[in-house]
Amino acid sequence: MIEETVKVKSILDGNKDAYDSIIERYKNRLYAVTLRMAGSEGEAERLVEKSFIAAYDRLATYDEKDFFSDWLYRQTLTLIKSEVASCGKTTPEDYIQFYNPRFLEIEEAIANLESNNRFEFLLHHALAETPEKLAVFLDEQVEDIKGRYQQSLKAIRGRLLEFDMETSSEECLSFDELIRYFDGNLRGDEKEKVEDHLEFCPSCREVLTSLKAEKRGLEDVIHTPKLEEDFNRRVLNKLTPYVKKVPKHRTWKYQLGVIGIMAAIFMIGAVVVPNLKPLANKVAAYIEYGTIYNVWTEGTYKATDEDLSFEIKGVDIDPLHMVVYYETRRNDKPLGNFMDFDFFEPNAVQLLDENGKKYPIEVSQPISSMFYNPRGNETDEPQSFVIKAIEEDKLPDKFVLKFNFRRMQTITGNWEVEVPIRYDKVENNLKVVELNEVKEIDGKIEVEFLTMIYGKHGSRLTYHVRLKEEEKKRLENLLKETRDGDHVLERYQNAAYANIQLLNQEGQYMVPIYYHSQMMEWNPGELITQDYSLYHYDYEDYQNLGKTKGNGPYFADVRDINYHEPSFVSLSLPLEEAENKPLNIELEGLTLKDLTVRHKDNGDEDDKSYQILINAVKNQGKSEKQFHWRVVGENGEYLELHYMGNHIPPDIEGEFELLNAEIFPRGIQKEMEKVTLQAEGAYNFYMFDEGELRIPLFEEE
């Protein structure tokens, strides 16, 4: 990249602070990999720091003909791989930064991979590099890298995805066929056959939706860990500045050459560049760096690299949202919905004033990419995402939106676009509705609706979900009895979450806008502001149905509420075969009635498994309860666990199936006589039918 080449030159001239932006760009990608290999935040941070220092010491060997990212990864990954080789097995509990059952499930699936496979799998997702590049970085064969990645992906999907293909019709596509279609491995007639089938088969579309959710979940989890802000400064403080080299005097031939090039530039500029400011920038760039940077002239908002182009088609602004319309093309053919570019990397999208001052913003994922678009349902409308200014009232009248992407469609490149904006603040565009509506659930939870704001390009709902004081005290007592001193559970024990959908007057569900912070950690107890676009979707089939004509008025539909119950469950289970062996164990409003254990021999010693089935009786409570089970072997090792059933239906009466799971003790060298079934608490769910808990978000006349 030209920018990084310039930085390297500056560093070698003695400006070590120029290394700060290089650290900032790559540190969290390396940390995301190292953390899952080193097993602790402190050790991972030490290794990333060590790798940046080692790369700095070898900067003089960098050849500007190469991509800087390629050079940096060659310097850092070999060091990291050799260091983590002695770290042993990593467990998510050693490094997970906050408690989220889905995130923990994904983390455990990654942690269960064999060490070398896990390292390469993490590199593929954290760095967004191709197998060909990874093979160069790691000095491996490309086909070996590809084979191990597919092996890892299959293992993770086996743990995270649950499909009952037996309930599908006989005409349904096979799971393998859908996987190959989703991974882009079908071509021609095969691909067309699948797309024709998907248009009329909700069961197969549901499988694709789950695959999309699994992929998005993996990306969210892998990119979640972030290093502290002072990490860069700590690294810089350990570096010794390079001594600037004194340049030789330019020869008369070189000086005449420069004069000739300058004259040619001005001649061309007089004909094709009516704006002299961009031209002056080009000349200044040439004089300073010896090359002509791409300076965006007024009205041009398109960047192309590696035959892939990114173009801003338009920006619409009101005080709530900046809607950015864009288009991506490869070899001049438009690309459909995709999420594979680095929206959420530091500095990928910036808002700057004329003096270069940066204003804090939030960036959403592309709206239409969150939903399934069946074949034949595409629109000509450009793709879009939303930018939200954190302090909208402080924005200047003139500013620039700067887009600086480095990855698209697994391709590493350089897509930089600057869009000048003249912003006229019009506050009367907004309609604010004060709601002050409180709903109580089961005497334990309150949902308070505060305000609804209707803007030109979308709306914003502010609400609060909280536990009542009596329920808080009950949970505090449970925590003291079971996990006193656990700071993670202490933080999340009083956190209640609600799934709230917005519907318009026609009963259409509106597409929510999810910003980066909402995919990361949420602070319990805070007011929640949720933005919604003007698009609507099919709630059952998860299809994007296009844009509505007007914004509201809307209803809020509460579909479910959940919160964590911080208790600790540990049951020792014998692995001897048994059918309905009596248990009679009391467990938090349940009676565990009986246990069934079945041995499964799949013809391979390394592929043997055990099916564990526990029946229970629900004694009390209106909520559905979901335990996050894990299975531990006799020596404390985590065992691979596939769920086939794991919840308490809210309307169940009498006996029901609490747990139906299959355990795979792969890698265990001896026969196991017993395992320990553990759960660090449970999630309580309240489920509501459509319209059961519906709140008007407008002033009724």
Image (spheres, helix red, strand yellow):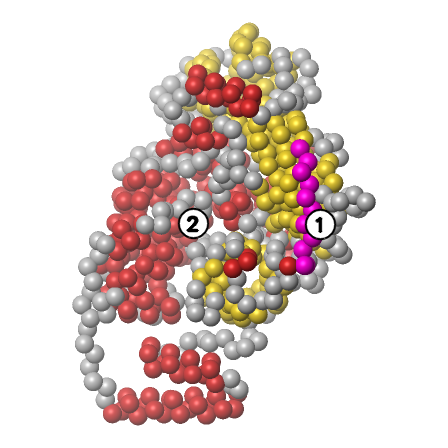
Q: Position of residue 51 (x, y in %)?
A: 28, 51
Foreground mark, 1 or 2?
A: 1
Relative to 460, 6 lies left or right: left
Name the residue tied to disc 1.
Answer: 536
In this view of the protein, which residue sits in the foreground, 279 or 647?
279
Name the residue tied to disc 2.
Answer: 126
Question: Dot 1 lies on which element?
Answer: strand
Magenta span: helix, strand or loop, mainly?
Answer: strand
In the image, residue 434 lies in the stretch drawn in magenta:
yes
Q: Position of residue 376 (x, y in %)?
A: 73, 56
In the picture shown, does residue 204 fall above or below 71?
A: above
Residue depicted at x 57% and y 31% = 466
Give the amino acid at mark 2. Answer: Ala
Magenta region: 428-438
Question: Image quadrant of residue 425?
Answer: bottom right
Residue depicted at x 67% and y 38% = 436
In this view of the protein, which residue sits in the foreground, 590 or 115?
590
Precedes in sequence: disc 1 or disc 2: 2
Total marks placed? 2
Residue depicted at x 20% and y 85% = 249
- Please identify the quadrant where the N terminus is shown: bottom left
In the picture shown, does residue 284 fall above or below 432?
A: below
In this view of the protein, which residue sits in the foreground, 318 or 402?
318
Q: Position of residue 81 (x, y in %)?
A: 30, 46
- Please identify the quadrant where the C terminus is shown: top right
In the picture shown, does residue 210 fall above or below 611?
A: below
Give the amino acid at mark 1. Answer: His
The reply to whether residue 420 is in sight is yes
Relative to 636, 495 lies left or right: right
Mark 1 → mark 2, Cα distance in angstroms: 32 Å
